[in-house]
Image: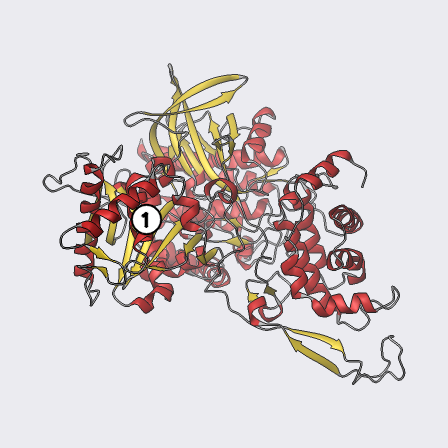
Amino acid sequence: MTDTPRSAIIKAKPIAHGLDAFRESAPLLSRELNNSSPTTQLDRIENEVVQDHALDLISALQILPASRILPSSSGGKNLFSDLSRLNLAINTSDFDVRRVVPLLAAVLNYESDTDIWEKVYSLVESTVTTGTEPSTPPLSGLSRTASFQQTPWTFNTGSFADTSDLRRNVDPILKNEVEDNLRIDHPDVFDTFFRQIPRLYEMTATVLQSCKDAEPPLFQEDVGWADWPPGCEEASVLQFLSRHIDHFLLLSDKHGFRPSKRRRCITTPNKPIPGSISKRKLDVGLAYDSNNELEESGKQGYNWSHILIPGELKSNPREDSHSSTWLDLVRYVREVFSAQDTRRFVLGFTLCGSTMRIWEFDRLGVVGSTPFDVNKDAHVFVSVVMGCLWMSEEELGFDPTIVGDGRRYTSVQRAGQMERLCLQDLIKRQRSVAGRATTCWKGSVVDMAEQSLVIKDSWEYEERPEEGLLLKEATEAGVENVARYYHHETVCIGGSVDDVLDNVRKGLNNAAGRNPLQRRGTRSESVISPITSDVSGAGRGRSRGRSRTMTRKRSSNSIQASMPPTKRSCSDSPVKHGMQQRKNRVHRRLIMQDVGKSIFDASSPRALLMALLGGIKGHESLLDAKILHRDVSVGNVMLTMAEDDGFLIDLDLAIKLDREHASGAPSKTGTKVFMAIGALYGDEDHNFMHDLESFFWVLFWIGVHWNGPGLPRRRTEYESWNYKDTRELAEVKAGKVLEQEKFDKEVDKNFTAYCKVLIPCIRELRRAVFPGGKRWTTEDRQLYSRMKSILQQARGDLESAEQ
């Protein structure tokens, strides 16, 4: 490898011990490679086993920092994206495993970093760039077979539409939202999030010593806290925490330690906290003290926007290991994230008996500390309390690029000049923990209030192309009825890109700790035993007869089962400790010129139809520019403030039709209630016909929920669509629309009184979108014209009826 930039990167980012976990997982493979001749290598190992090892190695290589910096050999963003495509290519039934032998041998034989990366590039160039993967299908036909270019869908609690947010519905999806990115027993959580607090060690030592010196002592070594409730009843523990937090503040103040802003311990286990859709209670937490006084004065009202650090209590110490404990805390954190629109991450704690853990929640998932006992590890306990009371807002997880108490501001570097933006009103805040967490504000450039802007923040997988670049391209191409580009950037904090792994988690080792929800299992490595083989003599060739195999099970400590790639079953897809596919999200900011309003805020059904008409025009204009939107929903079809047109927003999931490969992102998140039937089945490449069908479902959804401008939307049986499996929902939708008589009864019965006037329109759209009462089977660009004509006719009919 003679390329100087590559060499410099390889030297600056050494592999070191980054592949040791892989080497330890494959002793039999290593032995076979070393004991076989080049012509007979792998003859004695089943292809499936070698294929599994190859996939594990690719995942391990992706975790290495160099993979994100080394250049792509196929025109992609970096070598990481090439490895994502290589992973997909290896995970096919016709892949020749011999092609990966040189790389496997180089890693298992501890060859130099340069040699290993050279073999990586060689494998990528021979596998990924030789046309092995399919290209984007042409517009003239419809593929009923899902292409590997289709990034898999996932659905989180931010994907709900018109939900009552009841726990029985939300909890299973919330658990699924974080369980693949959950780590507990991580030894470095405290150091990562607390050690940087100024004078924390000094304050802790002073407060703890004061507790020991008190008469009588508040704390004694080998005894613990004098007033710790022995039965750990909830009410008694809450009193203990509240009393000691206040006392720690008093002791600190006595010794000259004063936080810049006071915080209070709140204990409201039986009282719902305002600010959530459904009633949510919180056991304990630290909140803003609006009076900023040392002594508590009067009763203060709290809502979720005040909660800084939530906590969950259990009286039984054994519940420290129960998933229900951290799930309760995740539920609180979702409310905190939803109510605080500049929160990047949230810290929390659980206290089960006297066993305490610290937790960190961000847009990737959850990391929990190792447990400690508040009586036996008093120094850690006091450090945690003091740290939570003294943390700056940035250390608590707030975005330091958005400043101000009343009016809020942020600054961007645009066209070589710094512009200061005023954030005026919150438009949208996605209600989730892990995910994109899209947040939108209405704003303007300072001193240019007449030009309204939309400032959009989101946390995207690092592999996904930037929405800002795609929107900029669309705007420059003259695309109509789509929000216009103004500026975009990747948010930087502390001089570094604001991502989860390196900035939010400050480089916290992603391989440490464990995921308690991932099933541990065993996998057999089958090799032909030299003792029982039918081969005579000392030859190492493949036996012509049926071979008996020797099966060795891996230690359960080296294997963690997780969600597998598409091809392999769960039992065949272990993910070893430290070798999971790297996942990371990056904080991006996009600014758009057009401010509109939700179609639910339309002043009339006629204005609503104008929004849908404009949205379809925008979608067609994007397609003419070779951009496919892929995320048509109620929230992404907007109405202009003057109600004279509609337009599309949100190109988060949009793709270029001429792209050569998928982004490599682990998943994409959409709103399933608006998805086309074929997209829900998951057996078709996504094309413009799916999006046009989504416009139909948008109107259907509005018809069954909208009671009119300014009125609460109706709660309906359709809320259950948010929680159904995608295939089940596909069948439910098909049952609603494929028979004319059933559909007519459906809309007659379930459209609101206000939306009854839209029934003729939805019936005509059904005939166009589902011709002959069947799902469409071929792409048809004329569907744009037919749908626009139906909407225009319906608008005209409503206008005539109003006169």
Q: Nearer the viewer, residue 480 or 385?
A: 385
Looking at the image, residue 13 lies above or below residue 534: above
Q: Residue at x 59, y 38 (%)?
A: 465
Residue type, label 1:
Val
Q: Secondary structure at mark 1?
A: helix
Check the image and tell me how it is coloured: secondary structure
Looking at the image, residue 448 lies above or below residue 125: above
Image location of residue 209, percent across then percent down: 25, 48
- Asked where in the image residue 437 lies, by quadrant, the reply is top left
Q: Which residue is mark 1?
A: 384
Image location of residue 220, percent across then percent down: 23, 58
Q: Residue at x 36, y 47 (%)?
A: 347
- Asked where in the image residue 252 lies, by quadrant, the reply is top left
Q: Nearer the viewer, residue 168 or 480?
A: 168
Query: Is 442 left or right of 263, judged from the image as shown?
Result: right
How many marks do you count on the picture?
1
Query: Is 422 left or right of 564, judged from the image as shown?
Result: left
Query: Is 554 left or right of 764, judged from the image as shown?
Result: right
Q: Residue at x 73, y 38 (%)?
A: 6
Image location of residue 634, percent across then percent down: 42, 43
Categorize mark 1 by other alpha carbons within 10 Å: few (<14), some (14-19), many (20+). many
Q: Quadrant of the N terminus?
A: top right
